[in-house]
Image (spheres, rainbow, N blue to C red):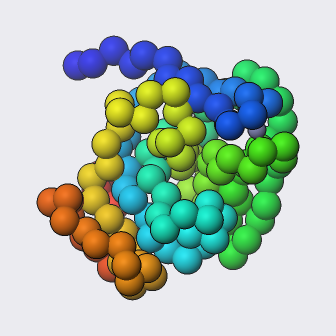
Amino acid sequence: MEENKTVEGGCLCGAIRYAIRGEIRNGYHCHCVDCRRSSAAPYVTWAFCKLEDYEILTGIPAKIEHADRVRSFCSKCGTPLTFQDPKKPDDLDVTVCSMDNPDLFPPNGHIWLEDKVSWVNLNDGLTQHYGYPKPQT
Ligand SMILES: [Zn+2]
Ligand SMILES: [Zn+2]
């Protein structure tokens, strides 16, 4: 049993700061085209928490709804912060690299390989999935 410590993070410019006070599950590198576009990076690394455990400490994130899912980001500097699927209203995906210490949540694998950019070479030994892996409960 590990005690849940508060994890904090924020955006590049500092306008948004957040805290997560609950369990955080290690997630995935997501290669989907929506993550790629919204971050302008080849893939985005996510971790998972409960929506109720996520608290904004400073600022008001901007939100964009795309493909029925809501992404939040800093309206001043553009840092991607969260992803929410209305089909899972209690859950929140958080960008690991907006956390103050991204080393805490190494991803379990790569997902949405069908959208992967061709010059990204994966040889890190992590699992690779087309689409999203079946939820582990
Ligand atoms: Zn910002
Ligand atoms: Zn994605």
Is 114 on the left or on the right of 88, as rendered?
left
Q: Is residue 131 visible?
A: no
The number of numbered badges drawn on the structure is 0
Is 47 on the left or on the right of 133, as rendered?
right
Q: Is residue 131 above or below residue 123?
A: below
**Which of these two is toward me, 86 or 11?**
11
Is 78 on the left or on the right of 97, as rendered?
right
Q: Position of residue 62 (x, y in %)?
A: 82, 48
Residue shown at 52% from the left, 27% from the top: 100
Q: Is residue 49 visible?
A: yes
Residue shown at 62% from the left, 65% from the top: 40
Residue shown at 56% from the left, 56% from the top: 88
Q: Position of residue 41 (x, y in %)?
A: 54, 63
Quick one: quadrant of the N terminus? top left
Which quadrant holds residue 24? Answer: top left
Q: Quadrant of ligand 1?
A: top right
Q: Is residue 74 above or below residue 83?
A: above
Q: Is residue 92 above or below residue 44?
A: above
Residue shown at 50% from the left, 23% from the top: 7
**Which of these two is toward me, 46 or 123?**
123
Q: Position of residue 129 (x, y in %)?
A: 29, 73
Q: Residue furthest front?
A: 119
Q: Position of residue 43 (x, y in %)?
A: 47, 64
Which quadrant holds residue 65? Answer: bottom right
